[in-house]
Image: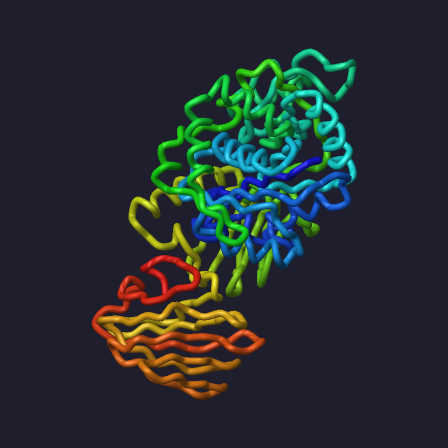
């Protein structure tokens, strides 16, 4: 019995501005029509003894994660919500503890939610091999056969072979991300693999190793699970308790110390899509070796990645460049400098700019909204509400709102009355009036909201009832 454990808590800062804190790369369809999370789960179909997955994700992403699983027709074993990030070891510990509550010691297949694997049948064969070895008590990591001397990955040095298998060996050591010269030496030696961050082991086996090498972490994770509250598919855990769990990767906490660790070499067209250069490498290229997405017009451009999300992007005379345009930001960088994008994100956060957190279009459990225009005394939004969804019952102290229905049907609570609005109909919500917006129909509701008042911020809100519990500073 194999249970996939999907680690979906990352922020994907190196893919800014496509990836944002509230809408990270694992939830975006940057590779094909499916999101990275969906691809990770869909490639596990048709594997014998594969059970429902455990997904570990950021609490802020819970509704998008659940919705994407539903779209892919995947029913999870559970979705564990991390209120804060504590790295991979605590996430894996939580999943193992949770599984051992009800399951008969399954083999955990731990997968990050943001990888590309092109040769699915080869990947399945390695999973089957890993399952056999995990049942014998080994802790398996999958090492990627390196295609080039990459400096963006950690490496694993091969030890002695296991059972004379050419692709299975002990782990001699883990190596941090090297410089270009050392990476070249590693690849030429044929003694190293890239560290993929994918693992297989029995739930009891990883618990035993954590008990030996990270007992404080394990004990705190057990307290976290014991105090957790089940809410539909979600396991909600206490922020304060989880914040006290030591943050560490599973590599440092266990795999570098255990004598049960082994590595299976994997050559299946793997990429972690950790940068825009990786998107260029995996993308479909034109005759000039360019990868274009969206409305792009070029002259004398070669070996470049250009992504236009909301408008025409024109470029002249570029060689090995990345240009990424979204509704509220544009990134321009040489392809060999895209690893520094995370420094831009750090600067945005230091300056408290919203562009590090969310896109121009902001997603909520009930739908999404996008700011169209704003000035000192007014703000205009386009709001989309999903069928049968509703916003919180609320009021504002500093603004009034006008709502105009563009398509669909709106059920509006305004004080003591309820109003049903059709296309091209509107209503006015005076300052201080308790109100709620609902979509009672079967198609999305789209409307234009015009705010006016002395203060238009999202935190001007008093919430009386909210079925989603999404926080005081959201509409």
Q: How many marks?
A: 0
Residue at image x 39%, y 64%? 466
Q: Residue at x 53, y 80 (%)?
A: 408
Q: Position of residue 310 (x, y in %)?
A: 51, 64
Asked if 430 appears above or below 267 in the picture, the reply is below
**Residue 390 can be seen, yes or no:** yes
Q: Nearer the viewer, residue 41 or 215?
A: 215
Q: Viewer-proximal residue, 349 or 300? A: 349
Left or right for 7, reference 215? right
In terms of image quadrants, where is residue 461? bottom left
Q: Quadrant of the N terminus?
A: top right
Vertical order, 141 against 351 (above or below): above
Q: Is residue 73 left or right of residue 121?
A: left
Q: Viewer-proximal residue, 68 or 389? A: 389
Residue found at x 46% / y 27% = 218
Q: Is residue 210 left or right of residue 164?
A: left
Q: Is residue 348 shown above or below 444?
A: above
Instruction: Tell me how the rendering is colored.
Output: rainbow
- Please state which of residues 334 and 208 is positioned toward the viewer in this rendering: 208
Q: Quadrant of the C terminus?
A: bottom left
Q: Position of residue 109 (x, y in %)?
A: 64, 34
- Residue 339 coordinates in the image, percent (x, y): 48, 38
The answer, for residue 17, to whether it is visible in the render is no
In the image, farthest residue toward the top: 160
Measured as percent of width and height from the top left, residue 114 is found at 58, 43
């Amino acid at each position: 019995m194999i249970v996939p454990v999907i680690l979906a808590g990352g922020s994907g800062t190196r893919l800014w501005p496509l990836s944002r804190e509230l809408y990270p790369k694992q939830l975006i369809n940057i590779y094909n029509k499916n999101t990275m999370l969906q691809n990770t789960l869909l490639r596990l179909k048709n594997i014998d003894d594969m059970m429902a997955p455990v997904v570990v994700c950021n609490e802020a992403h819970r509704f998008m994660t659940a919705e994407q699983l539903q779209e892919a027709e995947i029913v999870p074993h559970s979705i564990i919500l991390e209120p804060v990030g504590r790295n991979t070891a605590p996430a894996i510990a939580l999943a193992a503890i949770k599984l051992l509550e009800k399951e008969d010691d399954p083999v955990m297949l731990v997968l990050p939610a943001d990888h590309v694997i092109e040769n699915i049948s080869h990947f399945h064969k390695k999973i089957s091999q890993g399952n056999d070895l995990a049942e014998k008590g080994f802790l398996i990591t999958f090492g990627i056969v390196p295609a080039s001397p990459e400096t963006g990955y950690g490496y694993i040095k091969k030890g002695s072979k296991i059972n004379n298998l050419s692709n299975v060996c002990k782990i001699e050591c883990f190596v941090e991300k090297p410089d270009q010269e050392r990476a070249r030496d590693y690849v030429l030696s044929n003694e190293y693999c890239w560290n993929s961050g994918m693992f297989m082991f029995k739930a009891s086996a990883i618990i035993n190793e954590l008990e030996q090498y990270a007992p404080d972490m394990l004990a705190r994770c057990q307290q976290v699970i014991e105090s957790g509250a089940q809410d539909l598919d979600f396991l909600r855990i206490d922020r304060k308790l989880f914040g006290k769990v030591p943050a560490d990767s599973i590599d440092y906490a266990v795999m570098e110390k255990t004598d049960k660790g082994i590595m299976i070499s994997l050559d299946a067209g793997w990429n972690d899509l950790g940068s825009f250069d990786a998107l260029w490498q995996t993308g479909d290229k034109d005759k000039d070796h360019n990868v274009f997405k969206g409305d792009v017009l070029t002259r004398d451009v070669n070996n470049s990645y250009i992504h236009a999300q909301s408008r025409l992007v024109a470029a002249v005379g570029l060689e090995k460049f990345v240009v990424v345009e979204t509704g509220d930001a544009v990134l321009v960088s040489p392809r060999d400098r895209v690893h520094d994008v995370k420094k831009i994100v750090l600067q945005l956060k230091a300056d408290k700019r919203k562009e590090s957190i969310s896109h121009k279009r902001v997603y909520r459990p009930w739908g999404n909204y996008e700011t169209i225009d704003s000035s000192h005394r007014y703000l205009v939004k386009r709001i989309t509400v999903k069928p049968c969804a509703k916003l919180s019952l609320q009021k504002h102290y500093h603004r009034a709102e006008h709502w105009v229905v563009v398509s669909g049907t709106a059920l509006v609570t305004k004080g003591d009355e309820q109003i049903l609005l059709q296309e091209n109909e509107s209503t006015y919500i005076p300052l201080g009036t308790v109100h709620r917006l609902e979509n009672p129909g079967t198609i999305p509701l789209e409307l234009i909201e015009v705010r006016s008042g002395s203060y238009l911020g999202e935190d001007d809100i008093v919430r009386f009832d909210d079925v989603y519990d999404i926080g005081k500073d959201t509409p």
